[in-house]
């Protein structure tokens, strides 16, 4: 996105024009940015030729998944709904991995029937359930086991998953126990060790530590794993101050790992593929002066974009039409929802705004729309895919008749 003649423009269309046509709030995604992200992800890990499974939870729009599929990616899913969506989008079942701590019998059963690449189990009880269902169906099922490596991902505590206090995966001892259990099972084919230590990771050291732990465990067991699934978690720059994840170093650490272990690497990136492609455009409904600051009351709210309310996440916020005139007071950008956490950001300095102006909230392609809700019985926004000068409606704005 850039300003052309003071108008914020995505690919070749200015956001004001899109708003005039489709109303606000809306999510727009840049196709060329998505393409650039996928190609650079592939380039960064070219030497290890991984299977890249897009983490569907980051963006569940079927049209986005369809576009991603065209680049040869598979899918990482965590529920029956996501699995159905990935299949409907045309993702090859042989490129689908199913993660999650609490898969129910009907979800496992469906995954077995669809012959997906791997069910990544997270407990011995789950493996026993897979075994039970596989036996009924007279099948041998490829599974992975998610290891909890007890590694600090050095990210927000709410999105950290690889420490022993987190519910995810199994510890080393259980891992060895599971290997033994699988050896004696006719219906389970233990193919993969999986790990995912957290999200929005910008430091390569936690990944390196995780690889060391995985390597030690592999050395201790003589089980032959075909895949190591390293999860996702690669962070993006939400702010210019963010440092960047050093992909080169991460890739070298994996290459070193592969010299010792002959396995195929799987990745499950979400945010790094789709995060910086998305923008939420919203209109200023009212401006309210509260003395020390002004509330900029927007027509988007925490139900449309939950990250600031849930994690205190920062999203760059821009005026769609640029002006040089500065505001005299700090601006607090809020939504209309009846919660004090329904607030996007407070900015001390911003250009002067007036009612009906448009605001763009940036980098919301991942965990934006997918975390949205109908709280306060508000309608979910329309989603648009921008390709050059073309706009495609990829999800219609919800209607009251869908809700009531
Ligand atoms: N694989 C597994 C098993 C995961 O749990 C996740 C994310 C991913 C892959 C993808 O991670 P990514 O590459 O997108 O970082 N709602 C939070 C993020 C939660 C991530 C949950 N798991 C947020 O808005 O920051």
Image (cartoon, helix red, strand yellow):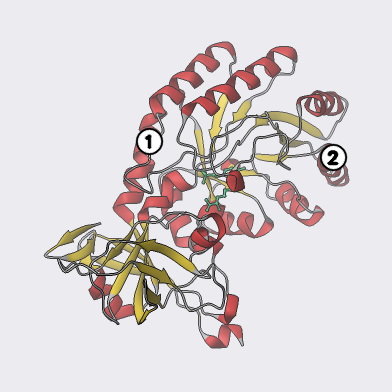
What label does residue 170 carry, if any?
A: none
Please name the residue shown 68% across and 50% down the image. Answer: 114
- Element carrying mark 2: helix
At x 29%, y 74%, the residue is 358
In the picture of the structure, the residue carrying the numbered disc 1 is: 244
Tag 2 residue: 131
Q: Earlier in the sequence, mark 2 or mark 1?
A: 2
- Left or right: where does residue 185 sit relative to residue 84? right
Q: Residue at x 23, y 75 (%)?
A: 17
Q: Position of residue 372 (x, y in %)?
A: 54, 67
**Does residue 301 lie above or below 81 as drawn?**
below
Residue 11: quarter of image: bottom left
Is 220 placed above or below 26 here? above
Neighbours of disc 1 within 10 Å: few (<14), some (14-19), many (20+): some
In the image, which is nearer the foreground, mark 2 or mark 1? 1
Q: Position of residue 241 (x, y in %)?
A: 34, 42
Q: Residues within 10 Å of mark 2 (few under 14, many from 20)?
A: many
């Amino acid at each position: 996105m850039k300003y052309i003649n003071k108008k914020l423009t995505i690919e070749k269309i200015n956001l004001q024009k899109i708003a005039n046509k489709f109303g606000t709030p809306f999510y727009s995604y840049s196709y060329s940015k998505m393409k650039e992200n996928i190609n650079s992800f592939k380039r960064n890990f070219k030497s290890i030729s991984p299977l890249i499974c897009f983490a569907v939870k980051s963006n569940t729009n079927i049209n986005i998944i369809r576009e991603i599929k065209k680049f040869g990616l598979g899918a990482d899913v965590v529920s029956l709904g996501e699995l159905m969506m990935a299949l409907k989008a045309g993702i090859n079942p042989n490129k689908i991995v199913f993660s999650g701590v609490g898969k129910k019998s009907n979800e496992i059963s469906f995954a077995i029937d669809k012959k997906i690449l791997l069910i990544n189990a997270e407990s011995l009880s789950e493996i026993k359930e897979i075994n039970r269902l596989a036996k009924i169906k007279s099948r041998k099922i490829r599974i992975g086991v998610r290891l909890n490596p007890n590694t600090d991902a050095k990210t927000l505590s709410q999105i950290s998953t690889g420490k022993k206090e987190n519910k995810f995966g199994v510890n080393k001892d259980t891992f060895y126990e599971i290997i033994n259990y699988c050896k004696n099972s006719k219906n389970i084919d233990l193919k993969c060790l999986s790990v995912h230590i957290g999200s929005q990771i910008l430091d390569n050291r936690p990944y390196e530590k995780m690889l060391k732990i995985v390597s030690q465990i592999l050395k201790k067991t003589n089980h032959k794993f075909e895949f190591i699934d390293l999860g996702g978690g690669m962070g993006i720059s939400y702010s210019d101050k963010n440092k960047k994840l050093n992909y080169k170093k991460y890739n070298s650490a994996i290459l070193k790992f592969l010299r010792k272990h002959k396995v195929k690497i799987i990745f499950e990136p979400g945010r790094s593929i789709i995060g910086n492609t998305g923008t939420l455009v919203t209109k200023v409904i009212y401006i309210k002066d509260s003395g020390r600051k002004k509330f900029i009351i927007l027509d988007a709210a925490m139900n449309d974009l939950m990250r600031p309310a849930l994690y205190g996440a920062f999203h760059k916020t821009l005026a769609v039409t640029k002006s040089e005139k500065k505001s005299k007071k700090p601006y607090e950008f809020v939504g209309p929802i009846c919660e004090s956490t329904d607030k996007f950001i407070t900015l001390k300095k911003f250009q002067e705004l007036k009612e009906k102006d448009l605001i763009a909230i940036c980098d919301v392609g991942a965990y934006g729309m997918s975390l949205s809700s109908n709280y306060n019985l508000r309608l979910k926004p329309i989603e648009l895919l921008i390709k050059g000068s073309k706009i495609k409606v990829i999800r219609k704005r919800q209607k009251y008749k869908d809700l009531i």
